[in-house]
Image (cartoon, helix red, strand yellow):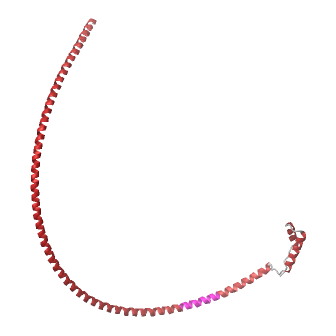
Amino acid sequence: MPAVAFDTLKFTKHLVQAGATLQLAEATAEALREATAEADLATGKDIERLRERLETGLARLDEKESVRIERLEEKMDAGFQQVRSEMDTRFVRMQSEADAKFDQMRSEMDARFGQMQSETDARFGHLEEKIDTRIGHLEERMDARFGQMQSETDARIGRLEEKMDARFGKMQSETDARIGRLEEKMDARFGRMQSETDARIGHLEERMDARFGQMQSETDAGFKSMEQRLLIRLGGMMVVAVVGIAALVKIL
């Protein structure tokens, strides 16, 4: 590879401006120039050629990988088709075997259910006979018990009715006696109240008559006094009228 050009003067100038001495800057620039001259550095063209080679290699690798992938896909498709065919065949065989087993189990179950149905019917028939017998005995016992209870109930109701009749008769007699005494007391009470009321009404009538008589006298006296005052006022008015007429006659 060609050597890289290095400007020692510019590098020395930068070091001096940064604060380094001129001797140190020149020595550093010379050392760096020698190092870069001896170093085998890649140029832009070298990098471009390397990139072209890499792209070519990658393209070839892509082509190879594409071919391998296509072959692999073909193998996978073929294997998948083969597996699918085998699975279909096995599924059909398993379906046939399952149908045969199901039919066999169904036949066995039908036979078993038939036997169980017969046994159940026989047991239910025997049980039904026992139940009917027990129900008959129970009905007889219940009828006898209800008959006895009915008789006892009728007897108790009869005794209760007798007691109630006697009790109601006694209560009726006591009630009638109390009502009679109450009526006597009320009659006596109403008699006294009537007498007191009549006496009070008589006193009230006497007081009202006296009051009306007094009011009549006062009214008559008032009317007489009013008549006298009216007569006096009429006399005065007549005198005034006569005097006025006389004065008017004189004027005329």
In-front residue for pair 177/147:
177
Residue drawn at x 43%, y 91% as measured from the top left? 95
Q: Is residue 69 magenta?
A: yes
In the image, farthest residue toward the right = 23
As drawn, is 182 to the left or to the right of 40?
left
| Residue ID at (10%, 45%) | 187
Q: Is residue 60 magenta?
A: no
Q: Residue at 11%, 64% (x, y): give it.
A: 161
| Residue 101 relative to residue 221: left or right | right
Q: Which residues are magenta?
A: 66-81
The residue furthest top is: 250
Q: How far across and how far down the image is residue 72, in percent?
A: 61, 89
Viewer-proximal residue among 163 and 30? 163
Q: Please provide percent x and percent y for residue 19.
A: 86, 66
By secondary structure, the bulk of the magenta-drawn segment is best described as helix
Picture quadrant where residue 136 is located: bottom left
In x, y percent, where is residue 247? Answer: 27, 7
Say above or below: 41 vs 107.
above
Q: Please name the residue shown 64% across and 89% down the image.
A: 68
